[in-house]
Structure formats: structure tokens, C-alpha cells
Amino acid sequence: MTDDRPTSRVGTSLGLLVLATVCVTVGASLVGVTRDIVSNGGNGVSDVGALFRDPALRAAFARTLAVAVSAGLVTLTLAVPAALVIARGLGRDSGPTLLMFALPLAIPPFLTARTIGPLVQSLASAPAIRDLTAGVLEGPAFTLALIYVVHFLPLVTAATVLSLRRADPDLEIAARSLGAGSWTIWTRTLMPLALPGVLLGTSLLAIRVIDDAASPTVLGMQDMLAPMIWRLNAAGQVQDAAPAVLLLAGLSALVVAIGWSSLRPRARGIADLRAGRTRAVRHARWRTPAIAVATAGLAIALLQPLSLAGLVIDDLAAQAQGSVAQVASMPFVPVFEPLVTTLSHAAMAGIALLLLSGLLAPAVRAASAGGNVARALVTALFALPAVALAAAWVEPLHATFPASLADVSAWGALVTLAALKGLPLGVFLVATRSFPPSPDLRAADRTLSTGRRGMQPWRAAGLRSGLCLALFLAGAATLLVEVSAALIVLHNPHDHLGVLAWDGHLPPSDWRTAAILLLMLTLGAAALAIKAWRVSPIRAHVQARVAGREERT
């Protein structure tokens, strides 16, 4: 049997130290934004308040809030009935539901805006629709809200379906036999189960809408908070964007505070997470961060050979370009260099997320006060919009690094930002999947391996290979879809593959190639990460033991 003792103090302390370092770094950037506001506002509180009473800023805040609330309400109205139907049809199979949950997060919304934008604009221009939405949302704002509804409807539906999987059909049958109607069953049994998924889905929708600067600019909308921050930074008015940055961060924090019960990471998963008096379980407490550090170190060591291989490929391509005249006309060639640059930094983001998640998981899993602090800080980091962080880091990057390192520092900031935005997901994956073997599994190990106790380190690492792959792909996909932050922080945004897919001024062939490559990479990463994470380590370990015993006998 196991007990509920806290996790290792060393792992918890190390995780809290890393988390405190990250929070101090992020907090220092926000302090810099506040200092810019104070310096622009003069010496009085009234002067600072006048910056927030700017009519353009207030209109952008109201427009952002209206689009987010409208998209959330319409999506919620459509998603809940669909989730009730899907939950009955899928049963216990969560694979399609997880894929449906991941697709809106893996696909940038601006691709949906470019694809169905003309159709939605023609629908929104109908007289009946204009009369219905008069005074609430009009013109491009209504079109943008409809695009967000279409894009994030699978996300909210899947989150609700995952919550409804805990519903007991026998309880519903018993309630109907006692005379309960559909409304009573929904309010008393199904709605309490669906509420966490509804809060999670709508909170993610609102955060992505608030933090999106690429989709509104596709429709020509510049009067929202995120596009306003991007426009001011592009014009060199970094300090003038400080009030909009704080408003954007506050609005996102409000959304996370409302959905706190569903957004916070799990404090308790499997009972063996914290426990055990046996030697194997005590060693498993430090095994997860050790494996994460070792895997990240190996990946970092492989980056140099891969970069050398990329240089060799570039030299060969340059030599062959003079002899092959048709290469210059191929649609893939203009996108090749941004593709290589983006993929290399996406790999760095995956390594960073793998390392941070492994280090922070013991602190987040702890049942002590340190665990509560760690969970609160991780959620607070998730509440900070990527656009706000990118805008807060622009001026410190310019002041700290010389011009020769401008591109390197900008890409490093984007990699760090992608790792921070993927950190809640990474910690959740580690906390719910990396657990030591249960007593029953250890007994099965001793039976199937003729009394051999424990587990070899390479076998333990093999059981966590799916988790490491899922974390790596999640971090890489996060950098690929952070187009809004790339527009702000990068000196040459067109080095990012997503920015090429966003830019409507490119030739049609280049835009289509960039969009197809971006979709293939993000969707492939999402599908492969789900498949890797769903592989049960206990089942795989027992199957390997059984197969080895059958071969020996």
C-alpha cells in the first residue's frame, strides 16, 4: 500500500527555485512597462490616469471585450448541445476528442480568417444579420467574432465532452424512472459535471481571442488591443504601447481568475505520485527531473551537429543553384530558409519546455504550501498574454544586447516565451503521466522476471519516452503558432514561417506553400503528441515483460 506523504523536498525546492527565477524575470519586464507609463504620465496620478482615458485605447478595450464575450457566448450555446450528443456516441474513447480539442490550438486563427473570411463577410452583410447585431457588433467586428466561433467551436465542444465522460448512464436511467425530466437531469447531474470543461474551453477561447493580433489585421481591424500594441511597436512607439499592454494583461488575468477552478493543474493524480515507503518509489521522486535534464542535455548536444548539417545543405544548394535554373522558380525555395530557421528554434522551444516541465512537476505535485504557491504561479504565468510579454521585452532586448546579436536575442526571447506559454500544459502532462510503478506492477515485475526487483534506468527512461516526445512536440508547436508575438519581438518577422503564412502581400504561390507547411507541421505535431501521451506506460511495461517471458519459455 502507499501513503500520501509529500514529494521529495529537494525536487520541490528545486522546482520552486526555477519557478521563482522565471517569475522574477517576467515580473521585471512588467515593472518596466509600469515605469514607462509613469514616465509618460508625468508626476501626478491624474496624468497617469489620463493615459488610460485615451478614447482610442478605451475603444480598443471595449471592442476586444465585446468580440471575446460574443464569441464565447455563441460558441458555448452551440457547443453544449453538441457535446451532449457526442458524449453519448463516443463512449470512453478519448482519442478523437483530444484531437478535436487540440486542432483549434494547433491551427492559427488567422488561417481560418483567410480561408472563410470572404464567406463570413458576405453572411454578415445580409440585411437580417445587420439588423440583428445593430448596436452590439457591426461590420468587421461581427465577422471576426463569427470566425472565432467557427474556429474554437471544436475546442469548447471537446472540453465539455471530456468532462461529461464522468457521467453515469445508470444514474440518469434511475432518475428518469423516478419521474425526473430532462431539465432536472441536466441541472442536477450533467451540468455540474460539464461545468469544468465549459469553463476551461471558454477560458482558452477568450485568452486566445484577447492575445490574437494576426487575425484582426487580416480583416483590416486595427482598433483592438493586440493589433494596437503591434502597430505601436512597429512604429517605434514602445512606451506609448505600455497602457495597452497592462490592459491586455489585466483582461487576460481576469479571464483566468474566472476559470481558475478548471485551469489550475491537478494537485493530485494517481496515489503513487507522492508516495511509497519502498526504495523504488523513493528513487522515482528524482527520476522524472533527472530524465528531463538528461534528455534536454542530449538534445542540446545534438543541436550543434544539426546546425553544421544545415550549413552543409545550404552550401550544396547554393552550388547547385547556378546549374539548375528551374530551382529559383520552385514555390518551395522562398520558404526554405524561414522554414529551417523556424524549425530549429521550435526544437529549442521543445527542449526548453521539456526541461522546465520536468523541473517544475515535483513542486506542482506537492501537497504542501509550496505546491499551492507553485500551482498559483504557473497559472499566473499562463494568464500573461504572449503579445504583452513580447511588447514588454522589446525595449530591454534593445538596451541589453548589441546590434550584432539583435536577431539571436529576439529569437531567444520568442523561444522563452513559447516555453512559458506551454508550461501549464507541460506540467499537467508530467504530473498526470510520470508516476512510479504501483505495488501491483512491482509484484508483476518480480513474478515475470523470476524475482528480479526494481527497474533498470534505461527501461524507466523508455517508459517516459512518449511523455518526453509529447512535451517536445508541444513546445515546438507553441512556437509555430505564436505568430502575434513573432510580429512584435522579431526584427525580421518574415524569418518566421507563420508570419509568411499571415502576410497577404506575398505572391499567392509563396503564401499557399507557407500555409500548407505550417498546417502540416502543427497538425502533425498535435496528432503525434496525443498519440505519444496516450500510450500507457504501465500497460507497455507489463506487455514488454510478458513478451520477454514468452520468448524465454
Image: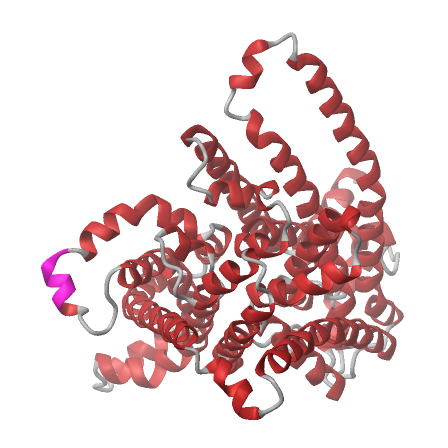
Query: Which SS type dominates the magenta stretch?
Result: helix
* Residue 336, placed above or below residue 374: above
| Left or right for 111, reference 325 | left
* The C terminus lies in quadrant: top right
User: What is the span of residues highlighted in magenta in the rendered image?
Assistant: 126-131
Residue shown at 38% from the left, 74% from the top: 65
Residue shown at 64% from the left, 58% from the top: 418
Residue shown at 53% from the left, 56% from the top: 484
Q: Position of residue 188 (x, y in %)?
A: 33, 86
Q: Report the front residue among 246 and 343.
A: 246
* 129 in magenta: yes
In which image quadrant can residue 284 be found?
A: bottom right
Q: Report the front residue among 387 and 78.
A: 387
Q: Position of residue 95 (x, y in %)?
A: 48, 53
In the image as oriented, which residue stretches furthest toward the bottom? 45
* Residue 409, placed above or below residue 523: below
* 367 in magenta: no
| Left or right for 235, reference 183 | right
Q: Report the front residue among 486 and 544.
A: 486
Q: Report the front residue among 511 and 150.
A: 511
Residue 425 visible here = no
